[in-house]
Image (tube, rainbow, N blue to C red):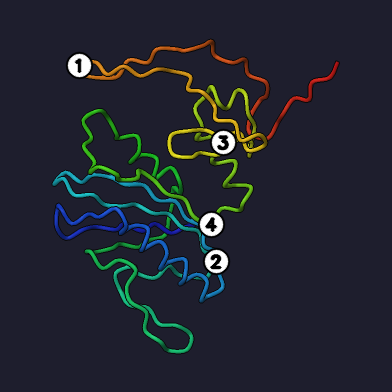
Amino acid sequence: MAWLVTLTYVGVDDWRADHISIASEQYRRHCARHRVPCRYLWVAELQKRGAVHYHLIAWLPKGVRMPHWDRETTTAGGRQVKAFWSHGMTNVEEARTGVGYLMKYLSKLDDGTAFPPHLRLYGVGGLTPQARLVRGWYNLPEWAKREHGVGDLRRMGSRLIVMETGEILPPMYARHFIPGGVLLEPLREMPERFHDGAYSKVTCGT
C-alpha cells in the first residue's frame, strides 16, 4: 500500500540541507525495526509563502500503517523513539494516485522557482543495487548514454569516468556564460546511439 507524507516547516527560513536526509534515515531505521521494506520517493516544493516543504510517497505491506513523522514512535520493546521530523507539522494519508501525485509538483517548476542553494529536488530510497545503477544511467547526459550502458560509468564531481579503464570522458560541450543564461558550444559530433535503452546493449561482430 502507498502512503503520502507531507513535511512542513514552521518558519519560512527554517530549511537546512540535511533535514530531509536525517528524517529519511530515521524512517529507514523504523522500517528495519519493524522488518518491513523501506521504499520511498520524495520531491521538494516551494509554498506560496516561500518556505520549502516535501511530499513523500512510501510503499508499505498491506496492513502496516505509516507513522506520523512529527510524533514519537514506540518500538516493540516499549522504547520511545524521537520524531522523524521535528521542524514543523506533517500529514499522513493513504495514496490514491501514487507517483503521479508527486509528479504534479515537479511539473510546477519554472525559471522563476527560487529554491535555496544546494537543495535537492528529489530523493529515492529502497532501490536494489541494480536499480541504483539503472537510475544512475538515466541521470546521465544523453551523449554519455548513447555510448555507454548501465554500470559503465561513475560520477566523480562533474566528471564521468569509465569504470573498466579509468578514463575520464572529455566534455561534450563548452559553456559560455552570457547575459540571462548559458550558451553551450558543441565540441564534437553527437555519438550515434548503439542501444535501445538501459537494459540492452549491442554486441558488434566482424
- Where is residue 127? Give x, y as percent: 56, 53
> What residue sits right under mark 1 in the picture?
179
Q: Secondary structure at mark 4?
A: loop
Q: Earlier in the sequence, mark 1 or mark 4?
A: 4
Q: Is residue 49 left or right of residue 110?
A: left
Q: Earlier in the sequence, mark 1 or mark 2?
A: 2
Foreground disc of the pair 3, 1: 1
Vertical placement of 126 versus 168: above or below? below
Q: Secondary structure at mark 3?
A: helix
Foreground disc of the pair 1, 2: 1
Q: Nearer the viewer, residue 135 or 48?
A: 135
> What residue sits right under mark 3 in the picture?
137
> What residue sits right under mark 2 in the picture?
62
Vertical placement of 34 versus 104: above or below? below
> What residue sits right under mark 4 in the picture?
126
Q: Secondary structure at mark 2?
A: loop
Distance of mark 1 from mark 2, alpha carbons? 54 Å
